[in-house]
Image: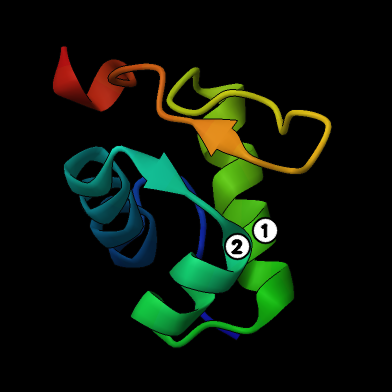
């Protein structure tokens, strides 16, 4: 399994992709970073906890809310 902790290379790269795209989903992140679905989901949940992405809406879509503390 990949290291998906906050501060890891996997997290930083995924964060950059999400900020560039302006949207995120576990299947998209899974494909882009060659992760298993659980890893992609945990990365996105960590980004949600940092305020980078919104919780999923009724159909599972998330919005990029802004920057997390790494950008400050």
User: Which residue is located at x 16 percent, y 12 percent?
Assistant: 72
- For this rendering, which residue is in front, 71 or 21? 21
Tell whether label 1 touches label 2 (CB within 8 Å): yes
Left or right: 26, with 32 as reference point: right
Identify whether 40 is placed above or below 51: below
Secondary structure found at label 2: helix
Residue positioned 38% across, 55% down in the render: 11
Residue 14 position, x and y percent, is 34, 58
Q: Quadrant of residue 62?
A: top right
Q: Which residue is mark 1?
A: 41
Image coords of residue 31 (percent x, y): 45, 82
Would you place residue 65 above or below residue 56 in this image? above
Q: CA distance from mark 2 to mark 1?
A: 5 Å
Side (left or right) of 69 relative to 55: left
Q: Looking at the image, which residue is at 56% across and 53% down?
A: 43
Question: Residue 7: x percent and y percent?
Answer: 35, 47
| Residue at which label 2 appears | 26
Task: Name the residue nearer the viewer: 43 or 30.
Answer: 30
Name the residue rendered at 44%, 87% in the picture: 34
For label 1, the SS is helix
Mark 2 or mark 1, which is nearer to you?
2
Q: Which residue is more in the foreground, 67 or 62?
A: 62
């Amino acid at each position: 399994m990949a290291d998906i902790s906050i501060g890891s290379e996997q997290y930083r790269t995924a964060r950059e992709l999400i900020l560039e795209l302006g949207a995120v989903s576990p299947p998209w992140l899974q494909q882009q970073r060659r992760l298993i679905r659980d890893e992609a989901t945990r990365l996105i949940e960590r980004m949600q906890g940092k305020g980078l992405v919104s919780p999923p809406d009724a159909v599972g879509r998330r919005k990029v809310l802004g920057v997390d503390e790494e950008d400050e």
